[in-house]
Amino acid sequence: MCVDDYDADIDATDVTKLSEQNRQELLDILTDAIKDTKSVDEAVKVLRGFGGGTASVNDPDEVSCQTESFVQRASRLCNQGRTTSGLDLLYNSVDELLHQGKFAQLNSMIERVSVDDHSIDILLGMLTTTLPASSRLPARSQFFNDVERSIRNRGEYEDGLLTGLEGCQPDGSRS
């Protein structure tokens, strides 16, 4: 069942065939997705991670929910040669989270980004778009350090590349 098709396929899986443990896992996934939302559309957006994803039950004993975060989707677009579209998605998604005051959600997302899996465009985009909220994103300082290490290891580092992107610590000091 594709999350994008929730309205058409919501009854496609007979949850009564799931084991109690898998039913609870599915309930936990759905509960987490809707706890801070006010509508089904918002919950689906959370489930999709602002990108896209799938939830499936191929076997009554196996529940699978995979989401593609907006960072992963932006990275995929960049890898397909659609860098402008990828960065637009990244900037718009982070901007939306910042405007909604969802700093904890954004911080959690930053913690999960594997810097070695993303292009320098995506990494610099993440640092740029999160800079205004750096003092409210505790994970960003480590993310900055991980980005610097990764691009140095790749041989893509140039003097001045990260200048001004350090941001502030939660205590107001510079990273």
Image (cartoon, rainbow, N blue to C red):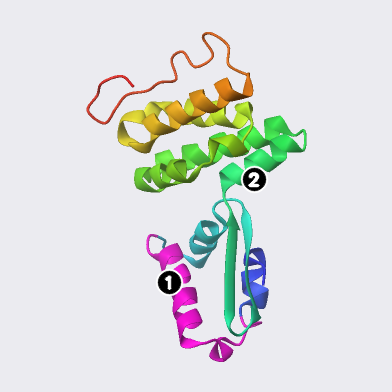
Q: Position of residue 153 (x, y in %)?
A: 58, 24
Q: Report the span colored magenta.
A: 11-36
Which residue in the protein does label 2 denote? 73
Callout 1: SS: helix
1 and 2 marks in contact (CB < 8 Å) = no
Q: In the image, 144: left or right of 58?
A: left
Q: With respect to residue 29, does 164 lie above or below?
A: above
Q: Residue furthest bottom?
A: 16
Along the viewing direction, whichever of 117 and 18 lies nearer the viewer: 117
Q: CA distance from mark 1 to mark 2?
A: 24 Å
Question: Which image quadrant is residue 73 in?
Answer: top right
Instruction: Kindly identify the amino acid type of the residue bearing the numbered disc 1.
Output: Asp
Q: Main secondary structure of the magenta part?
A: helix
Q: Position of residue 44 (x, y in %)?
A: 54, 63
Along the viewing direction, whichever of 153 and 170 lies nearer the viewer: 153
Q: In the image, 35: left or right of 116?
A: left
Question: Which image quadrant is residue 4 in?
Answer: bottom right
Let me know if residue 101 appears in the view.
no
Which residue in the protein does label 1 denote? 28
Quadrant in which the C terminus is drawn: top left
